[in-house]
Image (cartoon, rainbow, N blue to C red):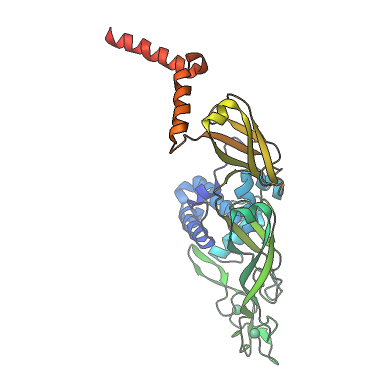
Amino acid sequence: MAEAKRDYYEVLGVARDADAETIKKAYRKLAMKWHPDRNPDNKAEAEARFKEASEAYAVLSDPQKRQTYDQFGHEGMRNAFGAGGGFDPGDLNDIINQFFGGGGGFAFGGGGFGFGGGARRRRDPSAPQPGEDTEQAVRLSFDDALFGTTVKVRVHAAVACPDCGGTGAAKGSKRSPCKHCGGTGTIRGRGLFGIMQQECPVCHGTGSVIEKPCAKCRGDGFVASDETVDVPIPAGIADGMSVRVPGKGNAGPNNGPRGDLYLRCAVAESDLFAREGQDLVMKCFVSPTLLALGGELPIETPNGSATLKIRPGTPNGAVQRLRGQGVRAIGRFPTGDLHVVLLAETPQGLTGEEEKLLKKLLAAEKDANFPKRTAQRAAAAAFAKRRKA
Ligand SMILES: [Zn+2]
Ligand SMILES: [Zn+2]
């Protein structure tokens, strides 16, 4: 491919932390704008833009694909989901049908311009359909994310109504074919871009209606659930990563199985460590005298207490790397390192005795001890000469 693929968030014009609703709105706007039927004079560009936006939406509207994309970018999408990169023409058609009405009439895939000739998948409207994945946020302390923990999460989801078993029909009542659409679930109507098939407004595409709706769920088949679930969080989880909780998403229509819940982790900062990928960076303030003389420095690492050996003449800002002492391996990320940055802290509030000692030291200083200072002074002197001339 000659051209680099644009970032999906950039394509949709949304922030990286945009919620599902924002992403949906952004896609809807772009899809309206670039719909090829609306751009007859500019069909090639419209098609390309429409396809690009649909692809971005296919990924960002799916929590699992979004997470993979967030972590690994386009490359990760190819690795994780095969050559197509996490979507197939059928997916794109499903998305477009969601927004522009389902059924025939609207030929993507097989039609004049396509997403690779994928056949539209017709579904039996009364068959159980898999439920949607959902997403919730959870806040974690830096330490909990580092070491792993178990969080109690209040999960809000739509689950199958216990009274009617998800059918929406009251006991003793049943579903009968929808008269409005003749049981097909779709009707032909005037859509945004001309005649096309649309979801039947009476049966909402299911093809059947309930004779007597269930009193508990008013015929929906769903009720809101509110349960508390213990979710194990693996050690090393990073800010923005999600943990999948299988079977805790929404139930599907017609008593379909529940989707998964994705717990998006927001990790607090630490006052001791900064995280950079799998590495940890720790600033350690030490006395200038220790840097000059060298010695030992006790530190705390994620794996326990340790002693850092400081060489004599260690410069301010020097970094020591402790291999394998960073964030523990998680997923495909290996264990990181700990980087200790040594920073000289100027002593404050000296006693008379300490002042005396330091004054002695200052008086004894010679240029050979400070090569950088010596070089700078020489440069400054040369500059002063040129300025006078
Ligand atoms: Zn019910
Ligand atoms: Zn109908």
Q: Nearer the viewer, residue 132 or 238?
A: 238
Q: Nearer the viewer, residue 331 or 104?
A: 331
Compared to 182, does 343 lie above or below? above
Residue 302 appears in view: yes
Quarter of the picture for ligand 1? bottom right
Residue drawn at x 60%, y 37% is 340
Residue extending furthest toward the front: 353
Depth check, front residue: 267 or 283: 283
Question: Does 359 sit left or right of 103 as displayed?
Answer: left
Can I make out residue 106 in this image? no
Q: Residue at x 64, y 61 (%)?
A: 262
User: Which residue is found at the position 45% from the left and 22% from the top?
Assistant: 362
Q: Is residue 97 left or right of residue 347?
A: right
In which quarter of the view is residue 63 placed? bottom right
Quick one: which residue is furthest to the bottom in this view?
172
- Residue 374 x %, y %: 46, 15
Q: Quadrant of the N terminus?
A: top right
Residue closest to the far top: 389
Going by the picture, which residue comes out furthest to the left? 388
- Residue 121 on image: x %, y %: 69, 63
Q: Position of residue 9 (x, y in %)?
A: 52, 50
Q: Vertical placement of 267 versus 347: above or below? A: below
Image quarter of residue 258: bottom right
Residue 246 position within the rendered picture, expressed as x and y whole percent measured from the top left: 71, 65
